Image (cartoon, grey):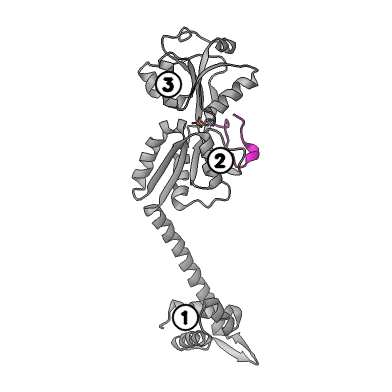
């Protein structure tokens, strides 16, 4: 038996339409070319696949059998193509992720592990504040975003994957540095350094104090976590930062976390993408990787995955 995939494809189309002309249109072939392919298939199989009754053609019994197999073969080939695309995507694809500045302190380690697992993948990483992350999601210029609060203004899918406590930091020489259970109200006597407008950290800080009817004295507006840390060390005020950003300063005893009532502000990290976006094989692999690698780093029940914007937490 000598047949070609092309013959099977042409035959399937003619069998579906029971019309050579329509099959020819569908396959961008001439009608004689279609008839020729069917004839060659019949010759190589040694059976008639169609019979002419009046003006119409019908499948013969052998034709119906061949049609079943032709469809199976076509399906299997489509499946194979999908799998190969998946493999090709993972071995040569590009991952575009954007993370909040606060996530930049742990994401490189995770990306390192991911890149060793998928060495062919090129990662493009952008580190920026919440406002820019929201714009990138809206403009669909990134695959995935890591941020401190899922967007309420966009229809997005968000998976919580790790705790993100916000703490108040001071230089070790600060009078409050060794105090226990500092009442919240005491903070009103201090000056705070705040992040730039558009920062998620700043939004969370403002919301937290506004909900408690408090207004803080704010000093300098500082455009990055690094600059806040430097300014706090220099004695320019207190800072409110994600705990993830200050590991080194705590180890080196350059900063201390103040023991303030109601603190830390407990937030979570979210892996976010636009709802309905078709994630590439690489992006999906990264999503699965992140959720798996950070499993256990989230306190059960505190921040469930957020499948819809209706279920988003408000911190
Ligand atoms: P950001 O971080 O303060 O750099 O915008 C985002 C967030 O933690 O929500």
In the image, the segment drawn in magenta is 298-315
Residue 63, quarter of picture:
bottom right
Give the image location of residue 215, x and y in percent: 61, 16
Q: Is residue 276 magenta?
A: no
Q: Secondary structure at mark 3?
A: helix
The majority secondary structure of the magenta stretch comes to loop
Q: CA distance from mark 3 to mark 1?
A: 70 Å
Residue 294, visible in the rendered structure: no
- The residue at the point 44 percent across, 86 percent down is 44
Comes first in the chain, label 3 or label 1? 1
Residue 158 is labelled as 2
Give the image location of residue 61, x and y in percent: 57, 84
Looking at the image, is mark 3 or mark 1 nearer the viewer?
Answer: 3
Q: Residues within 10 Å of mark 1 (few under 14, many from 20)?
A: some
- The residue at the point 49 percent across, 38 percent down is 146
Q: Which residue is mark 3?
A: 229
Q: Secondary structure at mark 2?
A: strand
């Amino acid at each position: 038996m000598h047949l070609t995939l092309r013959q099977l494809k042409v035959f399937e189309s003619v069998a579906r339409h029971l019309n050579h002309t329509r099959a020819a249109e569908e396959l961008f072939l001439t009608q004689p070319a279609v008839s020729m392919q069917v004839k060659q298939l019949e010759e190589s199989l040694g059976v008639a696949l169609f019979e002419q009754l009046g003006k119409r053609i019908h499948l013969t019994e052998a034709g119906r059998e061949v049609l079943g197999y032709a469809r199976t073969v076509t399906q299997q080939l489509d499946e194979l193509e999908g799998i190969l695309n998946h493999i090709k995507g993972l071995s040569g694809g590009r991952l575009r992720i954007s993370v909040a500045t606060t996530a930049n302190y742990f994401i490189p380690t995770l990306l390192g592990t991911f890149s060793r697992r998928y060495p062919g993948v090129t990662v493009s990483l952008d580190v920026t504040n919440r406002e820019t992350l929201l714009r990138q999601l809206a403009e669909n210029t990134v695959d995935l975003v890591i941020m401190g609060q899922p967007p309420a203004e966009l229809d997005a899918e968000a998976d919580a994957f790790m705790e993100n406590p916000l703490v108040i930091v001071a230089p070790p020489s600060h009078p409050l540095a060794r105090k226990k259970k500092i009442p919240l109200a005491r903070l009103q006597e201090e000056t705070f350094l705040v992040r730039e407008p558009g920062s998620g950290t700043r939004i969370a800080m403002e919301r937290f104090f506004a909900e408690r009817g408090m207004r803080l004295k704010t000093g300098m507006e500082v455009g990055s976590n690094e600059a806040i840390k430097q300014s706090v060390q220099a004695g320019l005020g207190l800072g409110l930062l994600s705990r993830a950003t200050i590991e080194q300063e705590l180890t080196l005893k350059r900063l201390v976390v103040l023991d303030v009532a109601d603190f830390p502000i407990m937030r979570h990290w979210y892996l976010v993408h636009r709802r309905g976006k078709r994630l590439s094989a690489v992006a999906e692999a990264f999503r699965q990787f992140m959720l798996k690698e950070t499993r256990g780093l989230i306190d059960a029940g505190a921040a469930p995955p957020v499948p819809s914007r209706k279920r988003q937490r408000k911190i």
